[in-house]
Amino acid sequence: MSSKKKQTPGTIAVNKKARHLYELSEFLEAGISLTGPEIKSIRLGRVSFQDSYVEFKQGSAFVVNLHIAPYENAGYAPQDPDRDRRLLMHAREIARYAGLVAQKGLTVVPVRMYFQHGKVKLEIAIGRGKKLFD
C-alpha cells in the first residue's frame, strides 16, 4: 500500500481543487477570526474548502463557504458551520486584492490552512479561472 503524502508541518487542510480550477498567483498569509469551539474542531481536522472563496465587503475580507464542522463538546450556543469568517489582513492588502478582484475573471481563493506559533493561518491566492472543457 502506498503511504500518505507528507504535508508541511502544521498543515491542517489543503485545497487541492484550487490548483485544478484556477491558475494561482500572488500567495498571501492571512489570519482568521475564529471562536474556541471552531479551533478545537480545526485541531481535529474537520475542515472543508469545497466552493470557498474570499469576498470583500465594506473594507474587510471574509472567507465564504469555509465549512468547519461543529465541535461535539461545545457547551454554549452552537455556531453556523458555514458562516462567513473575517480574515485578518492589513488595509493596504485588502485594498490591493479587492482592486484585483474587480478585474474580470479574478478570484481570491483559500489554498491552505495551517498552524503557525499556535495561531490558525490561511494561505490565500489570486486565481484566474481555467477553461475546463474536453
Image (spheres, rainbow, N blue to C red):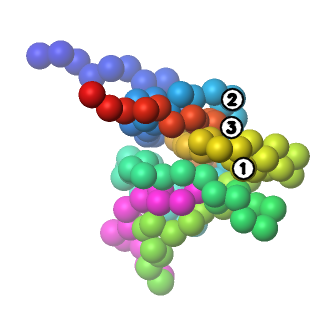
Q: Residue at x 37, y 33 (%)?
A: 132
Q: Is 54 situated left or right of 22 in this image?
A: right
Q: Amino acid at mark 3?
A: Glu
Which element carries disc 2, helix, strand or loop? strand
Q: Amino acid at mark 2?
A: Glu
Which element carries disc 3, helix, strand or loop? strand
| Residue bearing the label numbered 2 | 26
Q: Residue at x 47, y 56 (%)?
A: 66
Neighbor class of circle 1 (other Cα within 10 Å; few <14, some 14-19, many 20+) is few
| Residue bearing the label numbered 1 | 102
* Nearer to us: label 2 or label 3: 2
Image coords of residue 107 (percent x, y): 60, 44
Q: Residue at x 33, y 69 (%)?
A: 72
Q: Earlier in the sequence, mark 1 or mark 3?
A: 3
State the residue in front, 59 or 129.
129
Which residue is situated farthest in the left direction here? 1
Which element carries disc 1, helix, strand or loop? helix
| Residue bearing the label numbered 3 | 29
Figure quadrant of residue 116? top right
Chief SS of the magenta region: loop
Neighbor class of circle 2 (other Cα within 10 Å; few <14, some 14-19, many 20+) is few
CA–CA distance between discs 1 and 3? 21 Å
CA–CA distance between discs 2 and 3? 10 Å
Part of the protein shown in magenta:
63-76
